[in-house]
Each structure stands twice: as structure tokens, then as C-alpha cells.
Image: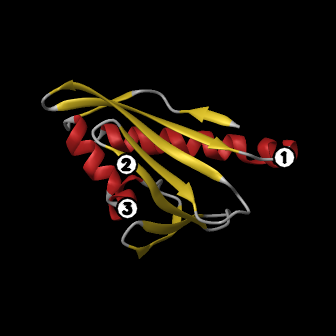
């Protein structure tokens, strides 16, 4: 299953945004209002939960400054990646698009598509407000 957010403009250079997204503790300020848990568990990993959803643990898998940051699920139960594709617009702004990619059976994909789409849009909206 592949899902993408809208592209949004962020008032940070591509390198600044890449560094921001590479620091996992910064994801707390991007999370939706209905977050019930956020905890940094290692320098490169965090766990979060939204109300009514199971906990998800993510870790930094790849960083390609200034254009890409990839987070991946720590658990094999829900194997997926969340990538931020960053394009420089100017010295003080950039565009970012979030991309979710996961391998799920048809039933699971149907159940999570809506919540994951909403989650991606919330993250990208909150990025645009930085």
C-alpha cells in the first residue's frame, strides 16, 4: 500500500528540514491532537500511539541530506516506511511530501488506509506551520 501527502512548503531550507526530521524527538510537535503517547526510546527511535490505535515504534532508517529522511517500523507485525521527500525552493524554504509504504493484506489495508491518510495529512499540515 502506497499513500502520499500533499506537497507543502516549509519555512526552512532543505538541509534544515532534513536535520529537523532526522531528530526523532521533533516528531512530537508534528503529531495530531489525538495522540495518547509519545516517547523517545533511543537516539534514533520513538514510539507513539493515537487514541484507539495500537502503539507504533519508528526508527530512523536512512538519511540522505538534504533531500530524504526515511523512518521505518521497528516491529515486523506492521512493516512500513514513512519517507519525507524534500525539495529546496530557496535558501529559506523547501517543499516536502510524505510517502507511506507498507505491505499489508487486503483486510488490514482497508482498515488502516483512512487513518493513515489522515495521519499523513496532519503531519504535513503541521510541517507547513513550522
* Mark 1, residue position: 105
Q: From the viewer's perspective, is 89 left or right of 108? A: left
The reply to whether dot 3 and dot 2 touch (C-beta < 8 Å) is no
Question: Around disc 2, counting alpha carbons within 10 Å, would you say few (fewer than 14), some (14 to 19), or many (20 or more)?
Answer: some
Q: Which numbered circle lies on residue 63? A: 2
Q: Which residue is mark 3?
A: 24
Residue drawn at x 37%, y 61% is: 24
Question: Which mark, by number, is residue 94?
Answer: none
Q: Is residue 36 left or right of residue 68?
A: right
Above-or-below relation of 127 to 35? above
Residue 58 % position (x, y): 52, 61
Q: Residue at x 53, y 46 (%)?
A: 82
Give residue 127's quadrant in the image.
top left
Quadrant containing the N terminus in the rendered view = top right
Vertical position of residue 44 compared to residue 122: above or below: below
Q: Secondary structure at mark 1?
A: loop
Q: Position of residue 107 (x, y in %)?
A: 87, 46
Amino acid at each position: 500500500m502506497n499513500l502520499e501527502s500533499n506537497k507543502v512548503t516549509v519555512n526552512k531550507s532543505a538541509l534544515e528540514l532534513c536535520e529537523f526530521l532526522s531528530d526523532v524527538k521533533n516528531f512530537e510537535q508534528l503529531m495530531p491532537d489525538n495522540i495518547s503517547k509519545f516517547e523517545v526510546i533511543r537516539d534514533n527511535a520513538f514510539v507513539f500511539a493515537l487514541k484507539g490505535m495500537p502503539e507504533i515504534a519508528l526508527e530512523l532508517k536512512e538519511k540522505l541530506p538534504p533531500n530524504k529522511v526515511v523512518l521505518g517500523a521497528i516491529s515486523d507485525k506492521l512493516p512500513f516506511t514513512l519517507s519525507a521527500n524534500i525539495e529546496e525552493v530557496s535558501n529559506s524554504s523547501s517543499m516536502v511530501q510524505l510517502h507511506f509504504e507498507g505491505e499489508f493484506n487486503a483486510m488490514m489495508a482497508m482498515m488502516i488506509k483512512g487513518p493513515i491518510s489522515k495521519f499523513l495529512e496532519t503531519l504535513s499540515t503541521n510541517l507547513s506551520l513550522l
